Image: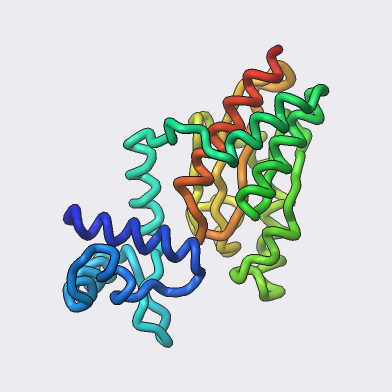
Amino acid sequence: MTERQAKILAAIVEQYAEVASPVGSVTLAKLFNVSSATIRAEMAQLEAMGYVTHPHTSAGRIPTDKGYRYYVNQLQSANEEDATIDRGARAIDVRITSAGEPRQAIQSAVSSLSEITRNLGFATIGSQLYMSGLAYLFTQPEFNRTSSVKAVAALLDNLEPWLRETAPNKPLSVYIGRENPIGKSSGCSLIISRFQSPFSSRSYVGVLGPTRQSYRSVMNLVRHAGKILEEELWV
């Protein structure tokens, strides 16, 4: 993949997360200050490589799971965490540090992640599952069918047992779409931070949302929530 193709793919991922509709060549041509024909040629190459696709009713492109994986790998290889603390991260700080009791701190982290990302926030401390934001999750356009809701419900039923048995050991793990080991057909991505707590060696906080989401922002927020929880729960 060329540098320009990588930038176009990143733009497609980020704009699709915002607008939930295929991204067209005219929009990208303005962004990159090149002709629409140039963008169409590059998008055709990205599609041939399997990084984007297009619904049959649209000339615009949307990312595939492979495209999302490339994008997320680029973020992770750069270890990209915003140097400045944005408003969302500050809100998480305030709510966790002012919560008082450990249980309240954990629930505050979960609720904050849910409200900021408009997806489902969760945490598991041992076998205890904290969760908030089902209403946010099911207002996403990806989950307007009964079959989608059932698939997500099945994933949630298995989330805590899976984390307990599998115990992902990376500081930040991202499971995209069909990579998701407990919900391949759910159309969801899991972004999970493992952190140390005095209550369990397997403590996690994260977000569950549609495959279409703002990975850069959500990854930073989940990583930050894990860091602050680790600091507060050991006080």
Q: Spot the residue most to the top.
A: 235
Q: Is residue 224 above or below residue 25?
A: above
On the rendered image, what quadrant is the N terminus found in? bottom left
146 up-or-down from 196: above or below: below
Which residue: 49% across, 68% down?
19
How many badges with numbers are in the image? 0
Q: Looking at this view, name the residue that lies furthest to the bottom.
A: 57
Tell me: 104 left or right of 222. right
Is 179 or 65 nearer to us in this picture?
65
Q: Quadrant of residue 194?
A: top right
Residue at the image position 34 percent from the left and 56 percent from the top: 10
Name the quadrant containing residue 221.
Answer: top right
Horizontal side, residue 135 vs residue 43: left or right: right
Q: Identify the residue shown where x is 53% and y is 45%.
A: 218
Occupied quadrant, residue 52: bottom left
Left or right side of 22 for 210: right
87 or 226: nearer the viewer: 87
Q: Is residue 141 above or below residue 89?
A: below
Looking at the picture, how far across and down is residue 41, in whole percent?
Answer: 18, 74
Which quarter of the image is occupied by the C terminus? top right
- What colouring method underlies this structural image? rainbow
Q: Indicate the position of residue 84 as horizontal and vertical percent values.
A: 46, 32
Q: In the rendered image of this protein, does residue 173 appear above or below residue 212?
A: above
Q: Position of residue 217 (x, y in %)?
A: 49, 46
- State the image coordinates of residue 99 (x, y, percent, origin top left): 78, 27
* In the displayed structure image, the side of residue 70 where residue 146 appears, left or right: right
Residue at the location (50% across, 29% down)?
Answer: 171
